[in-house]
Every structure is written in structure tokens, then in C-alpha cells.
Image: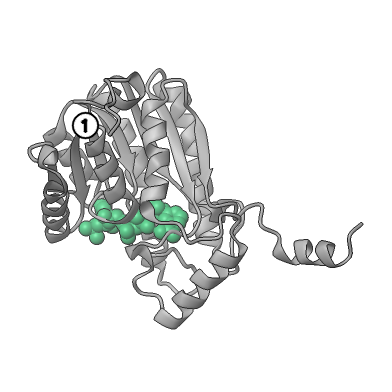
Amino acid sequence: MTSIPNFRSLTQLVDKTVVIIGGSSGIGYEVARASLEHGAKVIIASSHAEKVDTAVKNLSALHESFKGRISGSTCNVKVDREIEKFWDSVGQFDHLVYTAIDSVPQFFSETDNGRRAHFDIIFWGALISANYTMQKGYINAGGSITMTMSSSFKKPHKGWEIAASITGAVDGLTRGLAVQLAPIRVNTVSPGYVDTNMWHAMDPTAKVALEDGISKTALVQHVAKPEEIADAYLFCMKCTNLTGVTINVEGGRLLAQPLVDHWLEAKPL
Ligand SMILES: NC(=O)c1ccc[n+]([C@@H]2O[C@H](COP(=O)([O-])OP(=O)(O)OC[C@H]3O[C@@H](n4cnc5c(N)ncnc54)[C@H](OP(=O)(O)O)[C@@H]3O)[C@@H](O)[C@H]2O)c1
């Protein structure tokens, strides 16, 4: 087996503290795993204590070297004071990754409170975290913030206007915070459909049909797994010249034009 020396690209996160709000499941969990693989100390947070505890236990069990480098805490980002208390308990850190979401944002099918809560979790929780940690001087020099939005900003489905608008707000926040917090770097990752808990409430038959459609139309011809998206967050943390950028990691969803392609194949110009 090839032995790999301590190359810069492999060791940049060693002993850095990576905090992942939304790290108990899905994409955030995989960012936690990948950060641990890169030698970081990782703190995950989310609103359910039992989910945090299970995730910490599962991550610790993945590799001997992860033990003692992973811990977790509860934080409900719908409550401003809880966010501040959480950051006071963390103190100094290097990288913040923000992946919290509690359900797929719909509009017409929800109550007023449900509609507004999506903004609290996806947008306000990220902004309050960024603002509070900067005010308190908790982000170490060379640190970064990576937030999350989705390809529905650029290509919403019918009924997805709230998802499109929250994610658009996060896209704008990325550039605004990058300017405001410089030289701390701020970026955002924008996935397409990813097979995670976020879809747990979906009818199983409809989910199979959706995933079948994605496999056929996405340019990468498969449904994304959360570990594939996690790589983009690692890039955001490691690339010290990257800021104010939203990275699309959506398997070519934005380029896929199956109807037009089929028509052109049948009738070449
Ligand atoms: N999966 C997709 O298809 C997809 C596509 C595009 C974009 N995204 C984006 O990717 C990000 C991660 O989604 P995911 O698919 O990984 O979802 P997920 O597996 O459902 O994970 C969401 C995480 O957020 C936490 N969370 C929920 N409510 C919270 C609250 N009030 N306070 C703090 N944490 C809270 C959850 O834990 P608790 O329940 O314990 O709080 C969980 O750890 C989201 O921003 C989502 O919009 C996902």
C-alpha cells in the first residue's frame, strides 16, 4: 500500500475545530465524518438530544482515531438565545458548517407558522450564528463559514417558491457576509436532490419514482449520496482563496434538458 507523507492538502484541517450545526444527520453528518478523517476536532449540534448522542456514538465507532475528537450538543436554531448559549459553550473554533433543516419547505400546504419557521432555521440561524461568533471573537484567524442552500433557487419545481426564496436569501447572504466578515471566508454549498432524512415524510412510492427520474435525467446518472456533497464543504474549509461563492453540487441538474436533447437527437440540426 502507498504510504502518504504529511502533504499540505491532507493535513490542513488537523487539530482545527469544525462545528457543524445540523451535524446529527444527512449531509452534516457526512461533513463530520470527512472532517474527522482529515484530523479535525468536530462538534456537532442539532435540536434533538437523542439524535446528537446517537450520531456522536456512531461517529466515534467508525475509527479508533476519531475517539476523543468528536462531541455534540443540543441547539435549537429557532431560538436566538439558544444559538448564543451554544456558541458561548463552544468558544474558540476554526470552521462553522451550517446544514440545519427540519422538513422540505412547502408553502401552500403549510400553516403561517410553518412557512415562517423555514426562514428561521435555514436563514436566520445561520446569520445569527455568524454575527454572534464574530462579535464575540470566537472564529480563529484563517477560519471560515460554509452555509447551505439548494438548486431550487435556480430551478424551482412547481410549489417550491418558498424553497427558492429562502435559498436565494442565503445566496445573497453568502456575498454580504463575505464582505462584512473578511478576512474570515464565507461560502455556500448548493446541492440538488440528496438521499437523506429530509425526505423521510415522502410517500415511499413517490420517492422511488422521483429517484428513478433523477437517475435518468441527472448528467451524473445517479442519485447523490450525502458523502458526495460533504466533499464540497471540505473544499470550502480548505481552500484559503475561496470566499463569497456558492458552489453548485447538483449532478448536472441545472444543465439537464432531456426533452430538448431527445428532440435534437431525433432531428439533428
Ligand atoms: N437532501 C436534499 O435533497 C437537499 C437538497 C438540497 C439542499 N439540501 C440542504 O442540505 C442541508 C442539509 O439537509 P439534509 O438533507 O442533510 O437534511 P437532514 O438529514 O434532515 O439533516 C438536517 C439536520 O438539521 C437538524 N435540525 C433540524 N431542525 C433543527 C433546529 N431547529 N435546530 C438545529 N438543528 C436542526 C436535524 O437534527 P434535529 O432533528 O436533531 O434538530 C439534522 O441534524 C439543508 O440546508 C437542506 O436544505 C438538502
Q: What number of labels is visible?
A: 1
Residue 38: x %, y % from top left:
26, 33
The one of 192 and 268 positioned closer to us in this rendering: 268
Query: How dense is the environment of label 1, judged by Cα within 10 Å: few (below 14), some, or many (20 and up)?
Result: many
Q: In the shown orientation, is residue 48 left or right of residue 127?
A: left
Q: In the shown orientation, is residue 179 left or right of residue 56?
A: right
x 45%, y 75%: residue: 207
The one of 47 and 218 positioned closer to us in this rendering: 218
Q: Can residue 119 be spotted in the picture?
A: no
> Which of the 4 quarters of the picture holds residue 235?
top left
Vertical position of residue 269 compared to residue 190: above or below: below
Which residue, as the protein is rendered here, is positioned at the far right?
Answer: 269
> Which of the 4 quarters of the picture holds residue 83?
top left
x 45%, y 42%: residue: 189
Q: Quadrant of the C terminus?
A: bottom right
Q: In the shown orientation, is residue 12 left or right of residue 70?
A: right
Name the residue that disc number 1 marks. Answer: 40
Residue 101: x %, y % from top left:
34, 56
Q: Is mark 1 within 8 Å of ligand 1?
A: no
Q: Can residue 27 be spotted in the picture?
A: yes
Color encoding of the figure = one colour
Residue 135: x %, y % from top left:
27, 25
Residue 8: x %, y % from top left:
33, 19
The one of 7 and 30 positioned closer to us in this rendering: 7
Ligand 1 position by quadrant: bottom left
Q: Amino acid at mark 1?
A: Ala
Which residue, as the protein is rendered here, is positioned at the far front?
Answer: 1
Under circle 1, the secondary element is: loop
x 84%, y 67%: residue: 266
> Which of the 4 quarters of the picture holds residue 1?
top left
Vertical position of residue 1 compared to residue 256: above or below: above
x 48%, y 61%: residue: 223
